Amino acid sequence: MNWIAILYVFLLAHVKFLVTATIALATFPDLSAGEIFISSCLGALSCFNIFYFISYRIYFLKEKKTSSLKKRKSKNFKKRNRLLIKMKKSKIGFLLVCTLAPIFLSIPIGTVVVVKFFGNHKKTYLYVTALLMVMSFLLAYLNETIFNFFR
């Protein structure tokens, strides 16, 4: 068991989760799929937890300063804003953002996006946690299958 390789995969899962298993197998071919799965899953979940609770605190637990001196700005509704509102209110928008943001963006940026749009939903945390675990499993074992096919 190569602890430096496992630590490398753990830290790489923080930065780019989608390519972690591929890079891990390319740089350390002696790692098994189980080791890659466990280390990338723990790395993704630890990064997700850190950024979820920090961004949740920023977006939802901050003190609202009410000042009677400030003028309220009128909202500017452009096509982009309308699209974001439609997506936020639809069921498929919840699934798309919670699924695609942490995977295709990096985990920290995707987590902040998820919390900004759907942090007030109770099932957001559980859904993204389960999704990261399943995707880590799939990526680890599919990449090992593909690498073994070309050996």
Image: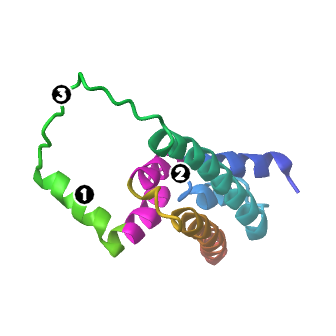
Pick the front one: 6 or 96: 96
Q: Amino acid at mark 2?
A: Ile
Is 75 left or right of 146, judged from the image as shown? left
- Is 125 located above or below residue 7 in the figure? below
Which residue, given by chain and number where applicable, does mark 2 sit on? 107
Horizontal and vertical percent position of residue 129: 61, 64
Who comes first in sequence, dot 3 or dot 2?
Answer: 3
Q: Is residue 104 left or right of residue 4?
A: left
Q: CA distance from mark 2 to mark 1?
A: 21 Å
Instruction: Reply above or below: 147 against 71.
Output: below
Q: Between disc 3 and disc 1, whose residue precedes?
A: 3
At numbered mark 2, what does the secondary structure look like: helix, strand or loop?
Answer: helix
Mark 1: give few (<14), some (14-19) or many (20+) Cα within 10 Å.
few
Q: Measure the alpha-carbon separation of dots 3 and 1.
A: 25 Å
> Residue at label 1?
84
Badge count: 3
Front in this rendered view, residue 87 or 39:
87
| Type of amino acid under label 3 | Lys
Q: Which residue is mark 3?
A: 71
- Mark 3 or mark 1, which is nearer to you? 3
**Given the current orientation, which residue lies at the most extreme front position?**
68
Q: Identify the amino acid type marked 1.
A: Leu
The image quarter in which residue 84 lies: bottom left
Helix, strand or loop at mark 1: helix
Q: Which residues are magenta?
A: 94-116
The answer to whether 3 appears left or right of 142 in the picture is: right
Q: Residue at the location (72% across, 62% down)? A: 36
